[in-house]
Amino acid sequence: MQVGIAGLGKMGAAIGARLMETGHQVAVWNRTAEKAKPLAEGGAKIAASPAELAKTSEAIITILTDAEAIDKVYGGASGILAADIKGKLVIEMSTVQPATEIALAEKVRAKGGSFVECPVGGTTGPARQGKLIGLAGGSDADFARAKPLLDQMCRRVEHCGSVGAGASMKLSINLPLMIYWQALGEALAISRHLGLDPTRVMELYADTSGGPNVLKVRGTAIAKMLAGDDKAPGTFDLDSGRKDLRTMLAEGKARGVELPLVERTLASFDEASKAGWGARDASGQAIYWSRRGKK
């Protein structure tokens, strides 16, 4: 299949490499053209604009930063919606509010395209291996059309309902994870005086009620950060976590739901980012807070 991908951040680039590996003809576009070069070296074609990408693709995948980026990539004279997308499949994978996906779906359908939203759970490793968790929203017919392609990117794809349902579920799943990184930092802060080996501490957390499933994957990396090896770039960085937390608060406000833990966690993430931790892995929030005020 001819697949076009717009948005080559860490996740978009990993998804592109995965789809090339599974035999698709991939074309790519990114606002910063430099990010397209690694995939181009592997055989991907570089499109000059989102419209050109859409014109030459059977399926169009977008994974972008936020609603503003979606508006720019889809709108305007050179946007995806400026191309003839009649009969084409659009899969939108950004983490945004449901209202953003619903509005976009209406525009795509008005142009004759099929639309499925499918934000994903997982980082660049699972993305590269086709082992993400997909949270899809769309009609039964559109989802059935998109599922073979989604199955090549995800180890599990959940059809959560109509468009908007996937976005709601993605925010719901990310919420306790972001709060957990702050909670872990507070837990480490009140036990740091013990001076225990970081690897031992993380193994203990993972084996008790103090550790969620994510520690099975991130525990070793967190132990290294606790031991001082905390300069590695994030697979899902702290600033991206801040963006998701802000999106959760906006969605809560739209639905009349108070989210006091999200609000306080965002303030804590903001503090860490201001201190220079924004580009580090989101789990680094726990490390930052565990050291905060250390004497």
Image: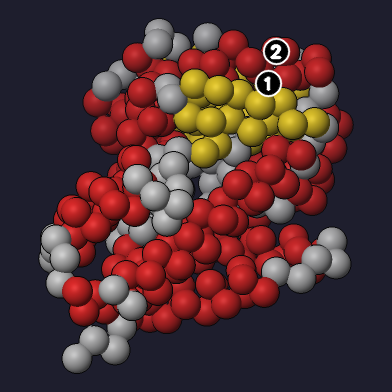
Residue 234, label in figure: none
Can residue 73 be seen? no
Tag 1 residue: 89
**Nearer the N terminus, badge 2 or badge 1?**
1
Q: Is residue 143 above or below residue 188?
A: above
Q: Is residue 252 left or right of residue 279?
A: right
Can residue 267 be seen? yes
Task: Assign a secondary structure to mark 1.
Answer: strand
Between residue 109 and residue 203, name the one nearer to us. Answer: 203
At x 67% / y 74%, what residue is drawn? 260
- Cα separation between marks 2 and 1: 8 Å
Name the kind of residue labelled 1 in the image: Leu
Between residue 203 and residue 168, name the one nearer to us. Answer: 203
Disc 2 vs disc 1: Cβ atoms closer than 8 Å? yes
At x 38% / y 70%, what residue is drawn? 187
Name the kind of residue labelled 2 in the image: Arg
Task: Assign a secondary structure to mark 2.
Answer: helix
Q: Quadrant of residue 295?
A: bottom left
At x 52% / y 39%, what residue is drawn? 121
Residue 58, position in %: x, y? Answer: 61, 15
Q: Is residue 154 left or right of residue 277?
A: right
Residue 201, position in %: x, y? Answer: 24, 58
Residue 145, label in figure: 2
Q: Is residue 78 left or right of residue 44?
A: right
At x 23% / y 86%, what residue is drawn? 294
The crowding category of the residue bearing disc 2, from other C-alpha atoms within 10 Å (few below 14, some 14 to 19, many at least 20), is some
The crowding category of the residue bearing disc 1, from other C-alpha atoms within 10 Å (few below 14, some 14 to 19, many at least 20), is many
